[in-house]
Structure formats: C-alpha cells, structure tokens
Image (spheres, helix red, strand yellow):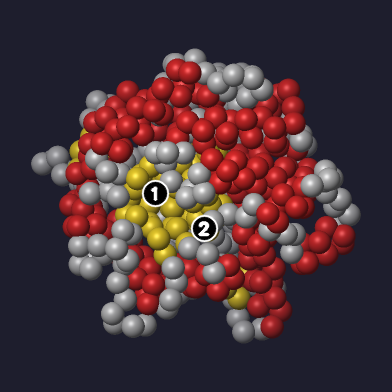
Amino acid sequence: MSQLAKFPEGFLWGGAVAANQLEGAYQEGGKGLSTADVSPNGIMSPPDFSMKDFNLYHEGIDFYHTYKEDIALFAELGFKAFRFSIAWTRIFPNGDEQTPNEQGLQFYDSVIEELLKYGIEPVITISHYEMPVHLVKEYGGWKNRKVVTFFERFAKVLLERYHTKVKYWMTFNEINVLLHAPFTGGGLLFEDGNKDEQAIYQAAHHQFVASALAVKAGHELNSELQIGCMIASMVTYPYSSKPEDMFTALSQDRKTLFFSDVQARGHYPAYMKSYFKENGIAIQMEDGDLDMLQQHTVDYIGFSYYMSFVASTDPEHVKQQTSGNLLTGIKNPYLEASEWGWQIDPVGLRTVCNMLYDRYEKPLFIVENGLGAVDTVEADGSIQDDYRIDYLQAHIREMKKAIGDGVDLIGYTSWGPIDLVSASTAELKKRYGYIYVDRDSEGKGSNKRIKKKSFDWYKHVIATNGEDL
Ligand code: BGP
C-alpha cells in the first residue's frame, strides 16, 4: 500500500439508520402498518399479524419526535452524510393508493431541511427491510408483479420531491438478504417453512426491474443523481487450500454477487442462468425487462460489511458453527467474534472493497459497518466503549489501505450512530451508537441521549478526514 493513501476531499463520513428501527410513532401522521410493525421478534423472524406482543419497533427511539435534537448531535460529530430510509407506509399507508400521504412527506421534508441546515448530505434508502402489510396480505409481497408498479409510484414521488436536495440514493437495502430472510426482504411468507426458490428469485427479478425503473426516473429528473444498489457483502474464505473448498467459497459468494451483478452490469450472469436451469427455476419476465436492466444500471455500489464467512466441504468443519444473523457459517480459527458470533475481520473489508471494485469499476460506498455490543453506563454517567473504537479504527485503517490499492471509495456511514432497535433481535441490548439512548428492550427509560467515549473519537476522525485514527 502506498504510504501516501489518503481519504479523498469530500469523503462522505457519517452514519446510517433505517426508519423502522428508530422512528417509532408507528401510527402517527397517517402512517399505515408495515411489515416491521408486525415483527415483534425482529424483522428477520416470522411476523405476528395479531400484534399481541409488545413490539419495540412501534416506539423505536422516538426519532419521529426527537430528530432535531438527534441531527444536532450528528452535526456536532461533524457528519458529512446521513443515510436514512423512508417508511413506505408513511407515504403510501397501504401501498396501492394513487396519491401519497402529504403528512408523511412533510416529516421527511423536515428531516431533510434539518440535515441541509448543517451541511449534512442526506442519503436516502428508498426501501429498507419493510413494506406495507397490505401489500403482503393482498398481493403476496414482491412475488407479485403489481408491486413493481406500486414501488415505482412510491419511488417517483420521492425522487420528484427531493431530487434538487438529495443527490445520493439507493433502492433496496441489502437486496440479497431476500435469499436468506424472504419476509424481511420481500414480504414473502412460506407457511410450511420451506423457502421456495422459484418465488424468491421471481421476487428478486421484480425488485431488479423496480430498481431500474427508479434509476431511470431519477436520472430523467436530474442526471446528477447518484443512485446505487445496496448489498450485504459476504466475502467467503475457503477453509483450506483444498480446491473443492475454494469452489464452494466462490459459489457462496456468487449468491451475493448475483444481485450486484444484475444491478451494476445490467444482465443476468451465466452462472445464475445455469443455476436456474439445473434447479427448474423459470423467471417470468415481461417484454422490455431485460432492456430496462441493461439501460438503467446503478451509479455506485453501496454495501454493508460486518463480518466474513468460511466455506468447507469437510463435514467436520461444517460442525464448527458460529452464529450470525443471516448465514450460519463455519468458525474461522483466526478471528475473534462479537457477542452475537459475528466474526470480526477488518482485513476482509479491504478484500471486499478490492473485489467489488475489480468487478464493477464503479465508485463504492460503505453504507453500514459497526460493532453491536452491550454498553454499560458507569457510575459517573460515562460509557467507555473502547471495544467499539477498536473495531471501527481497525476497519477504517483497512479502508484507507483499499484507497491505496486504487479503490474509488466515496464514503463511510457506520451503522446506528445513535443506538436503535436491532434488526435481528428487536432489542435495544445490542447497540452500535456513538450516542447512547437511555431506553431498554421493554421500552423503559428516560430516552435521554448520552455521548459515549466513541463520540469524541469519531468526531476527531472526521475532523482530520481519517488522517488521525
Ligand atoms: C443490517 C441491516 C440493518 C442493521 C444491521 C445490524 O443487516 O441492514 O438494518 O440492523 O444489519 O444488524 P442487527 O441490528 O441485527 O445487529
């Protein structure tokens, strides 16, 4: 690596959140019921439409009412960018209406105004792990082609309203998670518990077309817009140098890269067409779909990175499972893991950056990364989260090396700069923030915001543009 590697001028330092994990106010401002609202055990778990159980997503951290105070703290951190999602149900409560809910739009008008007041670039995720419950019940979620039209309408409303104020967009959060958690990613329910690949890949096709339609609409409104894809990056190492292990690792990575391949290269890759043929999967397409995918590819590759994975053909290795919310993987003997079994691998981030840049030669934007940990408030009221600083510091160092390798990296928005409800556990035990929220998993607490030790650390990183870590 060149010793001279530096973060570029205008690098987008910041943080990332999702509407359903922090806004709360789930029935205010004309909002409809979203899939997150009916997922009391986490948005990765099966829903409970009866909503008998307490659901922390209903309250979040009350950002709907505290956004001014919270954005002021982000400004104090020196944020250049803030990534957030729009709750589809605030704009179209049922999803299939013709006209948007003006009150819902006004909330996001205010959030955007507040960010711009401080010179913070808003970065919008159009859809982050949720959709109107009505679209699930009435249409079966994303496996129904009609949902493409509803999404297009939703995306166009946002693009038309904000295209002069918001430059950076992404269509679907972690689009590849549809494979692992089909309800979370696509509103797909499989009553018998068996994930039907035909339905999942059909839903993926609909999301690809919907995403391309949003890219088209955005560019027609404003050619300067940068509209990206967003994948949960999952780099897989072969457990050994056994050639079969290598091939297994490659096959596992392709399950992720398939999604960015279609969105960034504009066509279905050969390996996937073969997979469909071998497995009797037939994607129904309409005339013009393939042209749409080809003509309206994304401008940048957005991705999350939390951990790396291991693949092996040896049943003994497969037994050494670690946990993790999306894939149960084999334990990597060289790595430590978080309390939730996510294997901590900063070098893997450099590898992912290089892999993605080699493959697409489009700008990369790391839109999620961070350490989920239990934080303790000391007797003096401070929170000494050195473990979080260590994690972030090591990852940012590797990002810098990736820039030295020649990667065009445009930004870094770490996950949950303010503590929020966890996607996989629906609790407030696993925290990511620089800002502590005094609220527990039962929703009890003062809701007060407290700066953790990492707050000053990250502030300094941003102030020095990553020079002094
Ligand atoms: C990603 C999701 C986020 C976020 C993050 C951390 O997969 O895009 O929504 O929650 O993971 O996950 P968790 O909250 O389960 O720790």
Give the quadrant of the N terminus. Answer: bottom left
Snapshot quadrant of residue 260: bottom right
The one nearer the camera, 9 or 148, is: 9
Residue lying at 89% horizontally and 54% vertically, measured from the top left: 280
* Camera-nearest residue between 205 and 432: 205
Give the image location of residue 226, x and y in percent: 49, 51
How many angstroms separate mark 2 from mark 1 (CA)?
A: 19 Å
Q: In this view, does 194 lie above or below 277?
A: above
Q: How far across and how far down the image is residue 377, in percent?
A: 21, 41
Q: Which mark is residue 307?
A: none
Query: What's the amino acid at mark 1?
Result: Trp
Question: Along the horizontal axis of the image, is 11 left or right of 180?
Answer: left
Q: Identify residue for label 2.
A: 300
Is the shortest distance between ligand 1 and the CB of mark 1 under 8 Å? yes
Give the residue pinned by disc 1.
Answer: 415
Residue 91 vertical placement versus 407 (above, below): above
Q: Residues within 10 Å of mark 2 (few under 14, many from 20)?
A: many
Q: How crowded is mark 1: few (under 14 residues within 10 Å), some or many (20 or more)?
A: many
Q: Which three-letter amino acid code belongs to the residue tagged 2?
A: Tyr
Q: Position of residue 299 (x, y in %)?
A: 54, 56
Hey, which quadrant is residue 366 in on the image? Answer: bottom left
